Image (cartoon, rainbow, N blue to C red):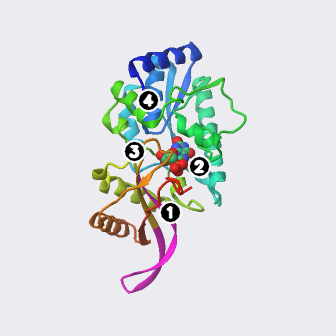
């Protein structure tokens, strides 16, 4: 629990002190962490904060439109079309940690370029406590912590929610009056669909992942999962019409958790699972099989990579 009456003014004062009269950019992702970091920083430095959303091509369906609506109140929202740069940098890369490093580095390069264009010296990020713990503990390099390049062209990185857990960030979001679509939004990882596509990232696999995640979010909303997702995990044989196909295998995962550090796979009823299966295979001709992941964390992680 966080005492929001105390936390909010303290965080705002700290940001003011750190950034002073300089300019900063905030990297928005659409998620609750970066949205809260943005709201705090906006309160602290107003229009000296330039919100930036990098469209990596790895985002959820409709994400860019959602961001546009949510951050309408901050003028100067800068949407960077970086899909080609991210996909080119990731071409042929199969190792999960290498993917994260490439994504982390590419994000920073995009931020640096945008920061230079608007004369911003600081970068505000929505890093939260578990991101740091998992990166420092060597579990995985969260792109916004361990995935950062060693040399960065910023005067400083400001992380106003770095000591909070996700449920505390949500409390702050509610206290600051952020919309419910933001405060209650399911977590989505910074590297986006890249960690929901096993092996090399291709446009085809991304499209399957994007459509399948959209279906999952709709179908599993009533279960109120901490996080629900779909991942493209490989290929298998199937039949479509009279033909044998070698199609994608989509794994569906839905978990309960408090902080993302441990999680329990949810018990989803058969009818819902069958409806998900039929929507995913119906929407994507190239999907041969849909499976449900029953593994808790540990031993699995929530994401696939
Ligand atoms: P795992 O897969 O480690 O995920 O069980 C725990 C929580 O963290 C999210 N996650 C990330 N968030 N950058 C983020 O901002 C990342 O690199 C990253 N990797 C995992 C994941 O979605 C889950 O909520």
Per the rendering, the mark at residue 186 is 3
Q: Are marks 4 and 1 in contact (CB under 8 Å)?
A: no
Q: Give the distance between the C-alpha atoms of the residues marked 4 and 1, in whole angstroms.
A: 31 Å
Q: Mark 1 points at which residue?
A: 205
Assess disc 4: are there few (<14), some (14-19) or many (≥20) residues with their C-alpha within 10 Å of its C-alpha. Answer: many
C-alpha distance separating marks 2 and 4: 26 Å
Tell me which secondary structure the magenta stretch mostly adopts.
Answer: strand
**Percent position (x, y) of residue 74?**
41, 25
From where the camera sits, is residue 189 visible? Answer: no
Residue 182, placed above or below residue 249: above
Examine the rendering and report whether any part of residue 108 can be seen.
Answer: yes
Give the spatial CA distance, label 3 vs label 1.
Answer: 22 Å
Rendered position, 62 above or below 219: above
Question: Between tags 4 and 1, which lies in front?
Answer: 4
Identify the residue position indicated by label 4 in the image: 36
Residue 162: x and y, percent?
54, 30
- N-terminal of the pair, mark 2 or mark 3, is 2
Residue 246 in magenta? yes
Bin the neighbour count of mark 1 within 10 Å (Cα to Cα): few under 14, some 14-19, many 20 and up. Answer: many
Q: Name the residue under label 2.
A: 86
Distance (Cα) linking label 4 and label 3: 14 Å
Q: Give the range drawn in magenta.
A: 228-249
């Amino acid at each position: 629990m966080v005492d929001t009456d105390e936390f909010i003014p303290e965080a705002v004062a700290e940001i003011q002190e750190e950034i002073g009269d300089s300019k900063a950019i905030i990297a928005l992702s659409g998620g609750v962490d970066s949205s809260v970091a943005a709201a705090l920083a906006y309160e602290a430095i107003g229009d000296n904060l330039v919100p930036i959303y990098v469209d990596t091509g790895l985002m959820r369906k409709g994400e860019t439109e959602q961001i546009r609506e949510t951050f309408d109140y901050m003028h100067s929202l800068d949407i960077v079309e970086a899909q080609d740069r991210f996909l080119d940098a990731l071409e042929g890369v199969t190792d999960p940690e290498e993917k994260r490093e490439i994504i982390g580095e590419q994000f920073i390069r995009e931020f640096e370029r945008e920061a230079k264009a608007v004369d911003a010296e600081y970068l505000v990020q929505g890093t939260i406590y578990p991101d740091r713990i998992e990166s420092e503990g060597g579990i995985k390099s969260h792109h916004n912590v361990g995935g950062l390049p060693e040399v960065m062209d910023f005067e400083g990185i400001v992380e106003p929610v770095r000591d909070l857990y996700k449920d505390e960030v949500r409390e702050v979001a509610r206290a600051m009056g952020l919309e419910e679509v933001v405060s209650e939004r399911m977590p989505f990882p910074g590297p986006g669909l890249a960690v929901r596509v096993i092996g090399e990232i291709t446009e085809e696999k991304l499209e399957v992942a994007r459509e399948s995640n959209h279906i999952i979010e709709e179908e599993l909303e009533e279960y109120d999962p901490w996080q629900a997702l779909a991942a493209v995990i490989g290929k298998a044989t199937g039949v479509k019409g009279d033909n044998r196909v070698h199609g994608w295998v989509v794994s569906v995962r839905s978990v309960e958790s408090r902080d993302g550090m441990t999680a329990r796979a949810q018990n989803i009823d058969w009818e819902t699972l069958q409806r998900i299966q039929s929507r995913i295979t119906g929407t994507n001709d190239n999907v041969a099989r849909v499976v449900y992941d029953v593994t808790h964390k540990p031993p699995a992680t929530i994401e696939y990579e």
